[in-house]
Every structure is written in structure tokens, then in C-alpha cells.
Amino acid sequence: MNNPTTLDQRRIEITEEDLPLHCPMPSMRLWNGHPRVFLPIEATGEAQCPYCGTHYVLKGGAKAGHH
């Protein structure tokens, strides 16, 4: 994740370097906006935070070998 974001941004593209994915991410300005929750994104290539609704998309999509 290259640029700091706020929790009002609803769609964020991440890379494998951001894994394991958790929301809020360290680069978010409002990093303490809600409890940290780890999101399983590897199997489907997408995940949504149950607290703030931010939608994460894994650049390159789902990874082979993940269930």
C-alpha cells in the first residue's frame, strides 16, 4: 500500500507485501478507528472489513494453493 488513506476510502488495492491483511492498515491515518481484524483475502482475492466496510482487492487476484 503506497499512500496513506482514511477509513472513508471504500476500495483499496493491496499487494502480497501487505499480507497478512488486516484492517485498519498501518498506513491509514485513522489506524485506531476500530479494532484490528485480520481478513482472509488469499483464497478469493477480495475481502471486506466487517467494521468499516472497506473493500480490499488483492492485486493479481487469488493465489493458487490457498483454500
Image (cartoon, helix red, strand yellow):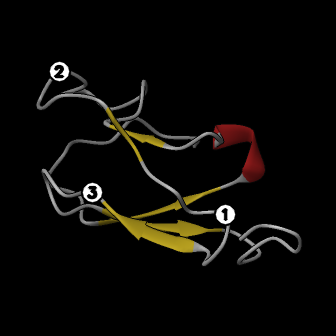
Which amino acid type is marked by label 2?
Asn
Helix or strand or loop: what does disc 1 sit on? loop
| x and y percentages locating residue 34 in the rendered image | 12, 32
* Contact, mark 2 vs mark 3 (Cβ under 8 Å): no
* Contact, mark 3 vs mark 1 (Cβ under 8 Å): no
- The numbered dot on residue 49 is 3
**Which quadrant: the N terminus?**
top right
Sequence order check: which comes first, mark 2 or mark 1?
2
Q: Which of the two residues, 4 or 21, is positioned nearer the viewer here? A: 21
| x and y percentages locating residue 37 in the rendered image | 32, 38
Q: Which of the two residues, 55 or 3, is positioned nearer the viewer here? A: 55
Q: Which of the two residues, 27 or 47, is positioned nearer the viewer here? A: 47
Which amino acid type is marked by label 3?
Cys
Which amino acid type is marked by label 1?
Glu
Tell me if mark 2 has few (under 14), some (14-19) or many (20+) residues whose alpha carbon lies within 10 angstroms of its own: few
Cα distance in 3D space between marks 2 and 3: 14 Å
Q: Which residue is mark 2?
A: 32
Viewed as shown, does residue 1 lie left or right of 12? right
- The number of callouts visible is 3
Q: Give the quarter of the image for residue 62.
A: bottom right
Residue at 56% x, 63% y is: 41
Residue at 51% x, 74% y is: 46
Sequence order check: which comes first, mark 2 or mark 3?
2
Please, is residue 11 above or below residue 37 in the view? below
Residue at 26% x, 61% y is: 54
Sequence order check: which comes first, mark 3 or mark 1?
1
- The numbered dot on residue 42 is 1
Q: Nearer the viewer, mark 2 or mark 1?
A: 1
**Which quadrant: the C terminus?**
bottom right
* Contact, mark 2 vs mark 1 (Cβ under 8 Å): no
Helix or strand or loop: what does disc 3 sit on? loop
Viewed as shown, does residue 62 lie left or right of 34? right
